[in-house]
Amino acid sequence: MGFKPIPAAVALLIGLIVWFAIPVPEGVSPQAWHLLAMFVGVIAAIIGKAMPIGALSIIAIMLVAVTGVTADSPSKAMNDALSSFGNPLIWLIGVAIMISRGLLKTGLGARVGYLFIGLWGKRTLGVAYSLAVVELLLAPVTPSNTARGGGIIHPIMKSIASSYDSDPEKGTEKRMGKFLALVNYHANPISSIMFITATAPNPLIVDLVAKATNSDIHLSWGTWALAMLVPGLVAMFLMPLIIYWLYPPEIKHTPNAVAFAKERLKEQGPMTRDEKIMLGIFAVLLILWAGIPAMLFGKSFAVDPTTTAFIGLSLLLLTGVLSWDDILKEKSAWDTITWFAALVMMATFLNKLGLITWFSGVLESSIGSLGMGWMGACALLLLAYMYAHYMFASTTAHITAMFAAFYSAGLALGAPPMLFALMMAAASSIMMTLTHYATGTSPVVFGSGFVTLGEWWKVGFIMSVIELAIFVVIGGVWWKVLGYY
């Protein structure tokens, strides 16, 4: 069977209830309400994992085309259903995932990890910081946070833990594995905050913010990276110390880790041609994404972020670092392009048909009636948005379902648009800390068995509070210094 019957039935039932059983509210068109019914059904199916998200997205595209909720003409409805496949932000993430394949294929990602452990690995805390720094260095060109935290860094972390006989199956996870696994995981949401290209949903946030502000705010790669730099570095610095305090490792000195890392580097041998090319392309991407040519030579030398991604991928193909076969096998990239296009399309037309404006108005009047002022009202919106993630197993589904309405309500209540956009963007990654199903990296790290469910949720909640405080307070001051509000 192509779907799980119970989650699929629940999702279908929810969609049908919204469509047929709930009267269309005053001020909402029937087309907008019917699209909402399909959208809610799709989100419910994603949460319940009725089918893979890509397969559900194909069904969503079909439903929009068949029902004609966006247009009277069947051909126009089909054009609308496929409209987001031309969105550059979607291709930015898809192509960047393809580029990140080069880090795995060449072994450059692992080499960088072992280099830092070789430098700082004499103490367990040093190993933890090495993992965090590598996470941060790989983030700009690894939009799959699962590939980064789960595919590159987690195997390195497990190898080091096992070299000290820290193994959950032997009951020795407290030696260092528990501490390192938690650092391995919690570095992932922080690095995801810091760059548009660090996790797939970030460009969706850029798109939703632009739409909500009539393109008055369009967060560029450089603007986002500069905004998140200071609070992100503070959070990344404090995180291993907090986890060290919560779950101190039994083994605190790790001279063997340095020898272990050097042995692995020796096995890898000198840097290969492909690794050097990958490193060079990595540098080109960062320079272009940061807008350095435009800063040095003027606006005529600016390169679009998606164009930059295509330049990077083209160079990898031309040099043979990646083959077209590698690109075809990069299923997560094609999957991301598919589900991203479907969800962005549905969110876009919910906005065009006036549903988001209506819902944000309901939120605004409900919270505004409490008389809290914009700061209190927006704090309430931010907390409700972030902690709703306990109900979501997908950051993309959560952001697609809630971001636009909550952000628009904040603006209507008087929040400075740039300040609230950055706080909502930070919260959209901080919420990954909360549960063992919060994002793709969570089940990978949790599944290795070093951390119990209770410990995972406890650390997740503590880190969410601390990181949100860092971004609100330190981020707020930093953004004021930058003149963003």
Image (cartoon, rainbow, N blue to C red):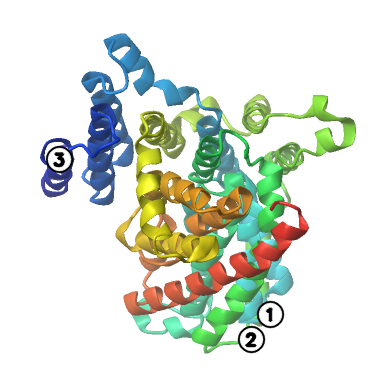
Give the labeled residue for mark 2.
253
In the shown orientation, is residue 272 left or right of residue 398?
right
Distance from the alpha carbon under mark 2 to that under mark 3: 55 Å
Circles 2, 3 touching at the beta carbon (< 8 Å): no
In the shown orientation, is residue 195 left or right of residue 20?
right
Q: Secondary structure at mark 2?
A: loop
Give residue 114's mark: none
Q: Secondary structure at mark 3?
A: helix
Residue 35, position as x, y percentages in the image: 27, 32
Query: Nearer the N terminus, badge 3 or badge 1?
Result: 3
Q: Amino acid at mark 1?
A: Lys
Give the labeled residue for mark 1.
122
Crowd around label 1: few <14 · some 14–19 · many ≥20 (10 Å): some
Instruction: Report the residue at 63% width, 42% height from top.
Output: 219
Circles 3, 1 touching at the beta carbon (< 8 Å): no
Above or below, 290 relative to 159? above
In the shown orientation, is residue 104 left or right of residue 42?
right
Instruction: Report the residue at 70% width, 39% height from top.
Output: 289
Q: Amino acid at mark 3?
A: Leu
